Image (tube, helix red, strand yellow):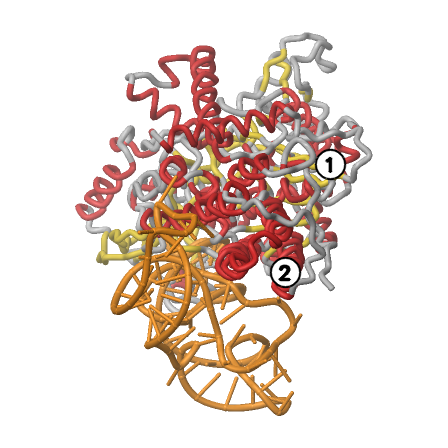
RNA sequence: GGGCUCAUAGCUCAGUUGGUUAGAGCGUUGCAUUCACAUUGCAAAGGCCCCAGGUUCGAGUCCUGGUGAGCCCACCA
């Protein structure tokens, strides 16, 4: 009962604040701006405890800056999250026996937007109960036209600057998601597999060269054998051909420095179509690229009678074949890490495919020059990012998905059916279907590239697109660069590093002045929270049980920059309970000071009594420390001081002393209590508003009252 | 194989630029409590601040080496 009525009150305050326009930024206001950018959560599932922490931190800073008199913009939004969304959504569809293919593009899209809407609503529910004071009138979703326009501008800029190209490249392909993914989107699983030592006969001889491989099924696509330089045994074979045991093809044997001396036999089969290293070696030695496995993860015609089989089965069969022909010298158990798709955990199949890329080197170099203009917390992230920029590689930006921004490239069906890329090739870049005719053949049968852009291609523009770039809006002028941005460390390269490069390249300015990396909340065994482990803690349950303010306070205790923390439902409950009790303490302070006010109170005081002086001095110290800690984003230190002051110094000490001279302490009690509430408001917005409203006060809300400065000095 | 981070009370963690006797919450123990207290207050116990060196008048904090844990990056077939 009590909990429910409390929740209603909280929502009431939230509506009061929002209805009063307190959350809105005003680009026309003469106040100085302070801008905070919410990292857009992925439209995938519900917001978790990490989001709750992240967004509570943002909200606290926004409320603090507002009270300090800034025109605050806390801009919220949601990311469409291409691959993750599709894999989640398609899983949902499969429960109904449906699939992408069965539904078709139009119907799938319609359902997808509905699904997005459901998730979106749950986000808003969470944001509301957490009390997030964001400017909802400026909320952005990364698939909306505003972002499409910015993304097109980005694409066009790279195209015009010749930083964009399309080419055959070995990519990491997820057969289940049906798309290329980036190295950054892979993870590794330890697996024990068989390492086969396979004999390849030397052409025109009875001798053999032996290679070690864990993937016998790809032998069908072998187009060479490389041995390390000056191999004592195999060097005599260099220049000769080996016979591919499964196809009978003759393949060249050559030396290459990239072959490891101390692994396997010192000879490496080269399969340019199915391995990144082989691709590189094959390219340098002009080897043909063959595919034994296709994009669905099945064997191709090349594998003859093994065609159509899935990789795992083909591996067995290929090994048996080799065994039967006595081509296997031996096999060993071999434990290595296998790349899998971060999203669906399917084994990655490297394949050669036509993809779009951006040349990143000039962007990275520019970012490196300006990195010092950003204040990183913790500061070692400057080095982490700069190391990454130094060994940057080209960014593959195309994905074979439906959920995303379509690549804004149109090919002339008549004169460029192969969809080649080039300024003279009957192709156009345009956000909409081009209206002009093909300059080469004068027809207008344009067809758009079917792939979509990598999610991060648009998310990387978040600091710009949210403010209306490429248009020169007044928002862009006033709030850019952002004062504050925060994120989880795991997307430092995917997102943060890209935002920095793209903002500098396109706008010639850093995207944000302060970049805060919070730690990762983990379970009691140090594992990340994940759906599959089922170890997550639902923030809503904590709020239900302990209230928002207490939950927020518990989360700030984990808000030290860059520090991972172990927690559990039990530990969260302990901390929440503690801060719930702190809230009770605040209510009792109010009761003591106001509801149980004696008759004989003194109207005013110069706080000259030594006990008054003492508490005022403590309070002034508190104002300084809370202000300073908020200015430097150390929320965990600020709440420690607030807690200690209010509970132990004010309640346990001063209030006890005051009982001897209750009447004359009234002005001091009221001043200290009210100031404490104001200092606490950014952290515990609801209870502080509730109590502040019951006090004698000026102004409409504690939210828009002036931040305490501690002008009162006792003699 | 590189790189980064961490190691502080039984547990989860603070400890800003080196500076008295190293802190909090929870937990434990004892006492009090018809007091503003959905209990709260008072008190206690509990620490070779991972190990070994070094710098310094002074080190939990800085440097070197070691041990252990975690994370990130990397093409070991």
Using the image as rendered, state which of residue A551 and residue A95 is in the foreground: A551
Residue occupying the far right of the picture: A30
Residue A71 marker: 1
Q: Earlier in the sequence, mark 1 or mark 2?
A: 1
Query: Quadrant of the rendered structure where residue A115 is?
Result: top left
Using the image as rendered, state which of residue A337 and residue A215 is in the foreground: A337
**Front position among marks 1 and 2:** 2
Q: Is residue A282 above or below residue A95?
A: below
- Please state, as top left, top right, bottom left or bottom right, where the C terminus of chain A lies in the image: bottom right
Query: Quadrant of the rendered structure where residue A176 is?
Result: top left
Instruction: Count numbered badges in the picture.
Output: 2
Regarding residue A541, the answer to whether it shows in the image is yes
Q: CA distance from mark 1 to mark 2?
A: 36 Å
Helix, strand or loop at disc 1?
strand
Give the image location of residue A237, x and y in percent.
Answer: 40, 59
Give the image location of residue A492, x and y in percent.
Answer: 56, 48
Using the image as rendered, state which of residue A323 and residue A168 is in the foreground: A168
Q: At x 64% / y 41%, what residue is drawn?
A: A499
Give the image location of residue A441, x and y in percent.
Answer: 70, 11
Regarding residue A200, the answer to whether it shows in the image is no
- Please state, as top left, top right, bottom left or bottom right, where the N terminus of chain A lies in the image: top left
Q: At x 29% / y 42%, what residue is drawn?
A: A246
Question: Circle 1 marks a residue in which chain?
Answer: A
Packing grade of label 2 (10 A; few <14, some 14-19, many >=20) is: many
- Marks 1 and 2: same chain? yes
Packing grade of label 1 (10 A; few <14, some 14-19, many >=20) is: many
Residue A404 marker: none
Residue at the disc numbered 2: A612
Marks 1 and 2: CB-CB under 8 Å?
Answer: no
Using the image as rendered, state which of residue A373 and residue A697 is in the foreground: A697
Q: At x 60% / y 29%, what residue is drawn?
A: A17
Give the image location of residue A456, x and y in percent.
Answer: 57, 36
């Amino acid at each position: 009962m009590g909990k429910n009525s409390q929740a209603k009150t909280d929502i009431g305050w939230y509506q009061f604040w929002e209805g009063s326009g307190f959350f809105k930024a005003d680009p026309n206001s003469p106040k100085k701006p302070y801008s905070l950018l919410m990292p857009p959560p992925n439209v995938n599932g519900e917001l978790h405890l990490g989001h709750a922490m992240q967004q509570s931190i943002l909200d606290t800073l926004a409320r603090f800056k507002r009270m300090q008199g800034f025109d605050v913009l806390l801009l919220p939004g949601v990311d469409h999250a291409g691959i993750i969304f599709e894999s989640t959504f398609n899983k949902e569809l499969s429960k109904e026996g449906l699939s992408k293919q069965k539904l078709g593009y139009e119907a799938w899209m319609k359902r997808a937007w509905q699904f997005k809407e459901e998730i979106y609503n749950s986000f808003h529910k969470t944001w509301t109960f957490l009390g997030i004071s964001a400017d909802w009138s400026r909320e952005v979703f990364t698939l909306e036209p505003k972002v499409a326009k910015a993304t097109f501008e980005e694409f066009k800029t790279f195209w015009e600057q010749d930083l964009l190209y399309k080419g055959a490249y070995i990519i990491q392909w997820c057969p289940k998601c049906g798309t290329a993914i980036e190295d950054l989107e892979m993870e590794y699983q330890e697996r024990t597999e068989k390492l086969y030592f396979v004999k390849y006969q030397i052409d025109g001889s009875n001798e053999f060269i032996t290679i070690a491989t864990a993937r016998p099924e790809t032998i069908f696509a072998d187009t060479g054998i490389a041995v390390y330089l000056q191999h004592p045994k195999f060097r005599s074979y260099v220049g000769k051909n080996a016979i591919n045991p499964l196809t009978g093809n003759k393949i060249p044997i050559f030396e290459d420095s990239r072959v490891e001396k101390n692994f396997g036999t010192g000879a490496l089969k080269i399969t340019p179509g199915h391995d990144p290293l082989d691709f590189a070696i094959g390219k340098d030695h002009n080897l043909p690229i063959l595919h034994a496995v296709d994009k669905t993860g099945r064997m191709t015609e090349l594998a003859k009678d093994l065609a159509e089989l899935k990789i795992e089965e083909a591996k067995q069969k290929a090994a048996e074949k080799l065994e039967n022909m006595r081509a296997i010298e031996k096999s060993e158990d071999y434990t290595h890490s296998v790349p899998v798709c971060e999203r669906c955990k399917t084994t990655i199949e490297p394949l050669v495919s036509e993809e779009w890329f951006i040349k990143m080197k000039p962007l990275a170099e520019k970012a490196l020059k300006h990195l010092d203009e950003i204040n990183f917390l913790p500061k070692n992230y400057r080095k982490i990012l700069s190391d990454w920029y130094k060994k940057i590689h080209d960014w593959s930006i195309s994905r074979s998905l439906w959920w995303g921004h379509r690549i804004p490239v149109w090919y002339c069906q008549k004169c460029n059916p192969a969809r080649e890329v080039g300024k003279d090739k009957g192709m156009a870049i345009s956000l909409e279907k081009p209206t002009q005719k093909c300059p080469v053949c004068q027809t207008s049968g344009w067809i758009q590239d079917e792939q979509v852009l990598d999610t991060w291609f648009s998310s990387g523009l978040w600091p710009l697109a949210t403010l209306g770039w490429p248009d020169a809006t007044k928002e862009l002028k006033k709030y850019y660069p952002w004062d504050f941005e925060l994120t989880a460390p795991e997307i430092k390269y995917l997102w943060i590093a890209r935002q920095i490069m793209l903002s500098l390249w396109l706008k010639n300015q850093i995207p944000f002045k302060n970049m805060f990396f919070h730690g990762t909340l983990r379970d009691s065994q140090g594992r990340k929270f994940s759906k599959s482990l089922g170890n997550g803690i639902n923030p809503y349950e904590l709020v239900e049980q302990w209230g928002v303010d207490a939950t927020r306070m518990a989360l700030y205790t984990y808000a030290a920059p860059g520090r991972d923390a172990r927690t559990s439902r039990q530990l969260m409950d302990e901390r929440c309970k503690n801060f719930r009790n702190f809230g009770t303490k605040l209510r009792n302070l109010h009761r003591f000071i106001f509801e149980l006010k004696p008759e004989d109170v003194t109207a005013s005081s110069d706080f000259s009594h030594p006990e008054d002086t003492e508490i005022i001095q403590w309070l002034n110290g508190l104002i300084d420390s809370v202000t300073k800690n908020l200015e430097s984003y150390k929320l965990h230190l600020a709440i420690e001081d607030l807690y200690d002051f209010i509970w132990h110094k004010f309640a346990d000490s001063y209030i006890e002393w005051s009982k001897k001279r209750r009447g004359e302490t009234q002005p001091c009690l009221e001043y200290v209590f009210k100031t404490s509430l104001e200092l606490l408001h950014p952290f515990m917005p609801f209870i502080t508003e509730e109590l502040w409203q019951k006090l004698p006060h000026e102004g409409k809300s504690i939210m828009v009252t002036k931040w305490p400065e501690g002008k009162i000095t006792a003699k």
